[in-house]
Every structure is written in structure tokens, then in C-alpha cells.
Image (cartoon, helix red, strand yellow):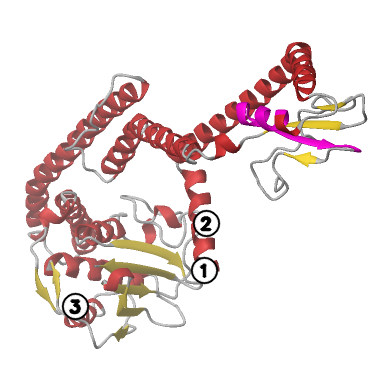
């Protein structure tokens, strides 16, 4: 029970701290409580002043008349007739007559004793002393009121709850455009511009949603123009690069021309790889629609890529593999997953030259919330790593930190970017961290 109470307290604090709707509702309730308290206090003060200035003399005169009607010495018969005619209780105490209209008044909650709010200091307003020494105390009997059903309180509570529910519904409707704007911003941030933010009203929130839709259309047009330009340039470059490579290969590979021929072929190969990576990144920008999914044995694919990657790397160290034995077949794009694994291994091997340990590639399965499983691929090298400031930018296109992972180490800054696109196209993600020493890249696949 204590844990449940703490859970609800934590949820309430989170709602008040992060939800505008709940804060407005709390403000409404506090405002209603403050207004009610102020009104009641003010009315009490006003009635108190009115009582002292006007009603008190009238009541005092009326009490004198009632005491005269009871008589001196007091008559019990007249007092009984008075209590039957008026909602009063009478108590007579003195040397001859000692009588109370309700003998059980102390045990009855509806009996109002004379020593109450009606009497605020001597002389007592509802108490009189006759000439023969008897004291007559009058009180207001609320028995007739309390015999009525106790419905007023419940009606009041129900009214408050209904008003609160109506206020909550109105506030919920009032801030609904904020939910639409939040969902729209998340869609636009993930690259989905197909569905604009719905315009439900024409107030300030509706104008804000309209401005965000206009901004999203402009951003979408700029992104499409950039994508179209990159695709056009990449396609146009492939033909002249192919012709230049063919012409270069026809050069003699002997004499002074040979070193320049090899250098030119390497540069042309880098340019070809750059164009290929650009085209692939634009295809993967379409997300899941660009994939050709099939059942893939990930462990077998990892072993195949690792064996092919080592002979071509600058380091001849083997790659340490740690593959889980319970990996099920996954629906993957074999070509794109091979590209991802090759880029990660090439990157790790390139920066493991002179390292104390060879790169390590791990694959394991992990159970998440709701019984859903995910597969993780980790590639770690033991090189010099990168600066912490550069770590968030490593998976950005054309980014190369000014460190050991610079231009001299090879690459144009698209390898990790392509790996991130492949992981996202499969519904997963890519994270990087400094493993000290080295860099670790973890790919998560659902």
C-alpha cells in the first residue's frame, strides 16, 4: 500500500511538473477554493456587522416579549405552548421552577444551548432573569431542520464534481492543439512531412500550428531539393569517373608513369566510393521502403564479413568474435547489413594499428519491456579514441574530427553515417561511446 501511494505521489508530481493541462486544472481548483473561502469569510464579516448594528436590538426586544409571555413566576404551560409554536427550546431555573423543554438536550445534537454564538458577552442575549429570581434561557432548536434528509451536502459535492469535470473537459479541449503540435513536431523531426498538423481553431494556438506547417513545408522542399541535387550530381559523376578510370588503367604500369598511375587509380577509387556512398545514403533516406528483407542468419553473416575484412585492412590482427548461440533468424536486408558490418570493421581495423588488442565484435540478444527481444551488435577497437566533444558528431555526414581519425587515416566521413541509416531503416539505432581505450559502436536491431 505504501509503495502504491508513493507511486501515485510520484505520478502526480510528474504530471504537475510536465503537463500544462494538469497545471491549469490545479490552478482552476485552487482559484475556486480561494474564491469560495474569500466569499464565505466576507459574508460572515458582513453578517456579523449587520447583526450587531441591526438584528441584535430586534432580537433582544423579541426575547424580552417572550419572557414576559412566560410570566413571573414562570409558567410551565406557557413555556410548553411557546416551544410548540416556535422553534425554541426553553430552560427555567430558579428557587421555585426548574424545568427544561427538552430534558435530554445535552445528548441530542439538534439541541442548541443558550451558551452559543448568539451570546457574545454579558448581558446574555437569550438569557433573562425575572423579578422573582428565576432565570430563563432561550435557545434555537434545529430539530425541525435536522429531520430533513441530509441531501444538501451531497448535492453541493456533486455540483462541485460536475463543475470540475466540465472545467477539465474545457481545459482539455483548450490545450488539445498543443498535443497536435507536439505530435507534428515529432513527425517532422523524424523526416515524415506527409501529414501536417491539423488546424482545429483560429486562435493563437491555431496560428502557431499554421506557422509550423508552413515552416515544415519549407524545410521539406529544401531537403528534397538537396536530395535531388546530390542524386543528380552523383549520377552525372559516375560516367566520367568510369571513363577516367578506364583511361588510367590503359596507361603503362612501368617506368616513371607507374607510381602516378597507382596514385591516380586510388584517387579515382575514392571518388567512386564517395559517389556510391552518396547514392546509397539517399536511397536509405527513404527508410524501411528501401530495404529488401529476407531471413538472415546474423552470426553467419558476421563471420563472413569478418573473414573478408581482415586481409584488406591495414592491420593484420584478427577480429575477436563473441557471437551468441541463441540468435534467431532475423528479417534483414543482407546487402545493407553487410555494408554496415564492413564499414564498422574497416573503421575499427583502421584505428587498431599499433593497439594493444585487436578489435572485438560482439552479438547478443536482450529481452526488453513487454517480452520484446532486441539484437545488439557491438564493434570496439582499442585505439586512441576520439574527443568527447566530437563523439556526438561522428555519425554525421562528411564529419571527421581533427584527431587520429582524420583525413590521413582514410575515409570521407560517410561510413558511420551509412551505418546509422542502415540501423534506422531496420527500425533500430546506433550509439557511440568512448570505451577508454578505443571507440565502441553499438547497433540495436528490433
Kindly check if marks 3 and 1 are in contact, taking CB atoms under 8 A apart as contact: no
Marks 3 and 1, how far apart in space?
Answer: 47 Å
Pick the residue in front: 195 or 273. Answer: 195
Image quarter of the C terminus:
bottom left
Question: Which percent across, then down, holds residue 171?
Answer: 39, 32
**Circle 2 residue:** 10
Q: Is residue 374 visible?
A: no
Residue where numbered disc 3 is placed: 298
- Which numbered disc flags the more N-terminal residue, 2 or 3? 2
- SS class of the residue under badge 3? helix
The residue sitting at 37% across, 62% down in the picture is 431
- Residue 1 disc label: 1
**Is residue 89 among what the camera can see?**
yes
Query: Given contact means CB atoms under 8 Å apart, are the residues at marks 2 and 3 in contact?
Result: no
Indicate which disc residue 294 carries.
Answer: none
Task: Name which quarter of the figure residue 116 lies in.
Answer: top right
Residues in magenta? 78-95
Q: Residues within 10 Å of mark 3 (few under 14, many from 20)?
A: many
- Nearer mark to the viewer, of 2 and 3: 2
Amino acid at each position: 500500500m505504501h509503495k502504491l501511494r508513493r507511486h501515485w505521489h510520484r505520478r502526480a508530481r510528474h504530471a504537475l511538473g510536465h503537463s500544462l493541462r494538469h497545471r491549469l486544472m490545479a490552478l482552476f481548483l485552487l482559484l475556486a477554493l480561494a474564491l469560495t473561502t474569500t466569499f464565505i469569510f466576507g459574508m460572515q464579516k458582513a453578517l456579523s456587522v449587520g447583526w450587531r448594528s441591526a438584528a441584535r436590538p430586534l432580537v433582544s426586544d423579541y426575547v424580552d416579549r417572550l419572557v414576559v409571555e412566560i410570566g413571573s413566576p414562570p409558567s410551565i404551560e406557557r413555556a410548553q405552548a411557546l416551544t410548540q409554536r416556535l422553534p425554541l427550546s426553553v430552560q427555567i431555573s430558579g428557587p421555585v421552577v426548574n424545568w427544561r423543554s427538552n430534558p435530554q438536550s445535552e445528548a441530542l445534537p439538534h439541541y442548541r444551548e443558550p451558551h452559543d454564538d448568539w451570546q457574545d458577552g454579558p448581558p446574555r442575549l437569550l438569557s433573562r432573569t425575572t423579578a422573582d429570581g428565576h432565570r430563563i434561557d432561550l435557545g434555537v432548536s434545529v430539530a425541525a431542520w435536522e429531520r430533513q434528509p441530509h441531501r444538501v451536502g451531497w448535492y453541493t459535492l456533486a455540483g462541485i464534481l460536475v463543475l470540475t469535470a466540465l472545467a477539465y473537459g474545457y481545459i482539455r479541449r483548450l490545450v488539445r492543439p498543443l498535443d497536435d503540435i507536439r505530435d507534428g513536431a515529432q513527425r517532422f523531426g523524424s523526416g515524415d512531412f506527409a501529414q501536417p498538423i491539423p488546424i482545429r481553431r483560429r486562435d493563437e494556438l491555431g496560428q502557431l500550428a499554421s506557422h509550423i506547417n508552413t515552416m515544415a513545408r519549407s524545410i521539406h522542399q529544401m531537403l528534397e531539393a538537396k536530395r535531388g541535387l546530390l542524386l543528380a550530381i552523383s549520377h552525372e559523376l559516375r560516367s566520367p569517373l568510369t571513363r577516367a578510370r578506364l583511361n588510367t588503367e590503359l596507361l603503362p604500369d612501368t617506368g616513371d608513369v607507374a607510381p602516378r598511375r597507382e596514385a591516380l587509380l586510388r584517387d579515382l577509387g575514392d571518388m567512386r566510393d564517395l559517389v556510391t556512398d552518396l547514392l546509397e545514403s539517399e536511397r536509405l533516406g527513404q527508410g524501411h521502403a528501401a530495404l529488401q528483407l529476407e531471413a538472415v542468419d546474423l552470426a553467419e553473416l558476421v563471420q563472413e564479413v569478418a573473414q573478408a575484412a581482415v586481409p584488406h585492412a591495414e592491420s593484420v590482427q584478427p577480429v575477436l568474435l563473441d557471437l551468441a548461440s541463441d540468435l534467431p533468424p532475423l528479417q534483414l536486408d543482407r546487402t545493407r547489413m553487410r555494408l554496415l558490418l564492413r564499414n564498422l570493421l574497416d573503421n575499427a581495423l583502421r584505428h587498431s594499428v599499433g593497439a594493444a588488442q585487436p578489435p572485438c565484435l560482439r552479438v547478443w540478444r536482450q529481452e526488453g519491456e513487454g517480452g520484446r527481444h532486441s539484437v545488439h551488435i557491438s564493434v570496439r577497437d582499442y585505439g586512441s579514441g576520439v574527443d568527447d566533444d566530437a563523439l556526438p558528431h561522428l555519425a554525421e555526414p562528411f564529419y571527421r574530427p581533427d584527431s587520429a581519425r582524420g583525413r590521413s587515416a582514410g575515409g570521407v566521413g560517410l561510413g558511420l553515417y551509412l551505418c546509422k541509416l542502415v540501423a534506422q531503416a531496420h527500425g533500430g539505432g546506433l550509439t557511440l561511446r568512448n570505451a577508454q581505450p578505443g571507440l565502441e559502436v553499438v547497433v540495436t536491431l528490433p
